[in-house]
Every structure is written in C-alpha cells, then in structure tokens.
Image: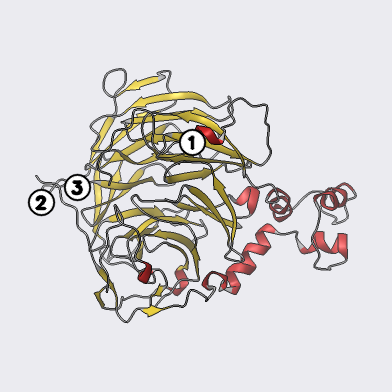
Amino acid sequence: MRWKRKIHHGGPSEQQQVSPLVDEVCAIDEEVSHLCRIKSEPSQRTRASIYAGQKRPVSTFKLLSGRESNCSGMGRFSSADCSYALRKHLPVKGPWCVDDMDSEAYISQFSADGSLLIGGFRGSHIRVYNSEKNWKVHKDITCKRLRWTISDIALSPDQRFLAYSSLSPTVHIVNVQNAVRESHANITEIHEGLEFSDDDDEFSFGIFSVKFSKDGRELVVGNNNESICIYDLGANKVTERINAHVADVNVVTFADETSDVLYSGSDDSLCKVWDRRCHKKQKPVGVLTGHLDGITFIDSRGDGHYFISNCKDQTIKLWDLRKMSSTTKECTPKGYEWDYRWMTYPSEARYLKHPYDQSLATFRGHSVLRTLIRCYFSPMHSTGQRYIYTGSSDQCVYIYDVATGKVVEKLRWHGSIIRDCSWHPYLPTLVSSSWDGYLVRWEATEDGRDPSMLKTWKQRMHPEGYTVSFVL
C-alpha cells in the first residue's frame, strides 16, 4: 500500500476582493452578539438592583455588595453574574513552565473537569499532568507504531481511557487511571489498537482527528481518505464509513451531548453537517460555505446551533446551523497557487471574500501556516463563552471577543508555532503548546517569586536536540 496526500487548488467562483480598509470582523450577527452578552454580563435583575436598570459598567465590588445585601432577591450570583466577574480576569499573565521537552509540542488539552492536562509531542510521547497537584506527571506514555507524529488525542468522558492517533489507519487506546505510571506500548502496558482501514482501501491513510462520543461507546475519526469513520467500542469494529468530502477530512466533532449530529471540515474548504438519525447517511443534512481554503479545526459551542472553524485562508468563521444549505456552488480554480506547509499566504488572497459566504462573523489577525492550528470557544463557567481563542504560526495565542469581533489579548512568549491551546473549564488558566518544545501556562494573576515563571531569554525557536526535518 502506498501513502497518498492530495493538494487541492479549487476555490469559489467569482471571488470578491474586499478592501483591507473594511473592518469585516466588526460585522457580528446581532443574535450572536446578544446571546454572548446575556451569558457573560450581569443579569437584568442584578443590574436593576444596583443601578436601577441603567447600562453602566458594574464593578466586582458592586456585584459582591449586591449579593451580600441580597438586592436581587436571589441570594446568590446568577451564572451570567459569575461569568461577568470572572471574565475580567483573563489568563494573560506569565507564562510558567509546565514541561520542557526535546520535541515539538503538538497538543495540549484539559479534561472536562480540569483535573488533568494532556500534552502530545512529536517524539512518540504523551504526558498526562495532574493540574491539582502542581502539574506533576500522572502518566507518561510512550506510543506505539506512530507515523511522523501524534495527530490527535481524545480522553473518554469518564477520564479512564485515552485514544491517540497518528498518520496511520490505527487508533490506540491506553488506560490512564491504573497504577502504571510509565506506560511503554506493549512492554509495560497494552495499548489496544483499533483498525479503521478496510479491504477496499487503495492506500494506507492517516487519521487527523479523533473524538469519543458523549457516552464513551464510540470513536469518530476524520482522515485523508476523504472519509469519516465511526468505531463501536463494544462491537470492536467500524460500524459507519461515510464518504464525506473530496479532500482530506482534517477534523470531525460532535455537535452536542446527544452525539447524533456531527460537524466535519476538510481541505475542500467546506463545513458539513451529518445527522446519524437520517436514512441517507452518505449525504450531509447541510453544507456551510464561506471559507476559501482548507479547514484545520472545528469547535462546537455545544448548543446544537453554533460552531467555529479555523482555516488556511487565515480566518476563523462563526456558523449557525440554521443558515446551512443543501447544495454547494460550483468552484473554479483559484488565481493563485500555494501550499501552507512551506509557503506564506499570498498577499493578493488575504482580503478575498467568498461570494456565497454563509458565516455569521469572520475573525482575522492570527496566522495558520505549516500545521493544523486549532481554535476554541472560551469556557461557559468562567466567561459565558464570550471569547474565541486560537494558536497561531506567528508564535502568539489570540483571544477574540465574540460580541465585537476584535482581538482583546495576544499572549506572546513562545519562539515557534503554537499549534494548540486549552483554557481550564473553571479556573482562569490557559495552557499553550508550541513547536519550541514548551508546554506553558498563563494565569490571571502574577507571582514573580514562582521559579517556574519563564523569562524572555529562555525563548527558543526549536526544542533542545532539534534536527531539521520535513513538517506536515
């Protein structure tokens, strides 16, 4: 079997040139802006009790005084009040070192309860850290049969099992809650392999994205075989195989807690929506058009309506399922050629706009080059999902305000590409992972006495012992 990677140069017909003077990011859909403010600003009852309904900034002191005096009659903060107070304390101080490895850091992800942090590195290495015990290593995993790098990691809902993929058709699963701290694949511990290839496959494909279903019974993957595969862990086999796109499927994720609806993003520039309850499972229930290049990541808001996508056209877009269409427009070749793995984005393409753009908002500022950079909604508990944050190839973490579309913070310290980052679900802590080999954390408050705080002179472009090699 042979390895295959396709590069597509298709683009939307009649692409429109948008003037760089047009502040496109501020054109936020009113419904989205209103929804963000409801979830992240003081409730009407709280505001009325403090300022008689006037639209004035509410200080934390006023919020606390109002709660102690029970001015609102609730005797407590509403979830919006909590989000409003906490989002004033963004994790922008630091950074402090979590780990320093001799290979590129590709993945950093908190568990659902925030107690564990998972870091994935190119040198066949995964580490699980206990965030509640001073970031001590909870599990040190040496992976099996990797092709190039760990492409994705998923933690089961009960936080017992970890699934990891690489650019091969096999996903491995390891128990992260047993007594074995040093997990060497099939030496100190069995890493069960789940095979996603089929006898009809013409080549050995690679997996770019892996996710557990919300009940932990299934795994869904996206791959460069242009398909989505769903694996039933109980039956120990692939139960669904969807020919989803006409290019690499870089990301697939579940829309909400039901696990019935899937979102997928591909190098064909399309976001597609799949409903597993439909009889025509090989056909999406909807398509969302607007990106001009390959989609690198998708994150769902979890409400069954909204999601965001990161793209090689150097934008993040916000989508609403209720605006999707059943068909896509015909595409014609672009007026430029480029490959994001080793070229800079063409200046003539930076302000092109899709003539049939269905997105609610477009966020510009960060850079998506050389790798599949990820973006996310900020946590509901601490921010009311008021923000979108993303890694970037210009060595920064960008935080955008969903209500205004503007960059509110840029976290600068790393010396190389930031592929992934993760915001703690409850605390004002953000962890970023970079190709400089560092896993670092950013906090809302600063403690200069902490010896793990990193100084500017410790920056570097590559990990210690780095050797030049081809990057996918």
Residue 333 at x, y percent in the picture: 23, 74
Assign a secondary structure to mark 3.
Answer: loop
Amino acid on which disc 2 is placed: Glu
Seen from the viewer's position, the closer of residues 67 and 251 is 251
Task: Count neighbours of disc 3 (C-alpha within 10 A) and say few if under 14, some if 14 to 19, many if 20 or more.
Answer: many
Mark pair 3, 1: CA separation: 36 Å
Image x and y of residue 231, in percent: 28, 45
Image quadrant where residue 283 sits: bottom left
Q: What residue is shown with label 1?
A: 459
- Kindly indicate the quadrant of the structure image that contains residue 149: top left
Q: Estimate how packed mark 1 is, as few (under 14), some (14 to 19) or many (20 or more) residues with alpha carbons within 10 Å.
A: some
Image disc number at residue 202: 2
Q: Look at 75% across and 60% down and name the residue there.
A: 43
* Residue picked out by circle 3: 205
Label 2, residues with CA under 10 Å away: few <14, some 14-19, many ≥20: few
Q: Name the element at disc 1.
A: loop
Q: Of callouts 3 and 1, which one flags the residue occurring earlier in the amino acid sequence?
A: 3
The image's mark for residue 415 is none
Q: Nearer the viewer, residue 361 or 453?
A: 453
Sequence-first disc among 1 and 2: 2
CA gap, disc 1 and disc 2: 44 Å
Kind of residue indicated by mark 1: Gln
Q: Secondary structure at mark 2?
A: loop
Residue most extreme to the right: 69
For the residues bearing labels 1 and 2, Cβ distance under 8 angstroms: no
Task: Name the spot of residue 77 as percent of width and height, x first.
Answer: 77, 50
Dot in front, 3 or 1:
1
In which quadrant of the rendered view does residue 403 lie?
Answer: bottom right
Residue 395's place in the image compared with 137, above or below, is below
Tell me whether circle 3 and circle 1 mark residues in contact (CB < 8 Å).
Answer: no
Disc 3 marks a residue whose amino acid type is Phe
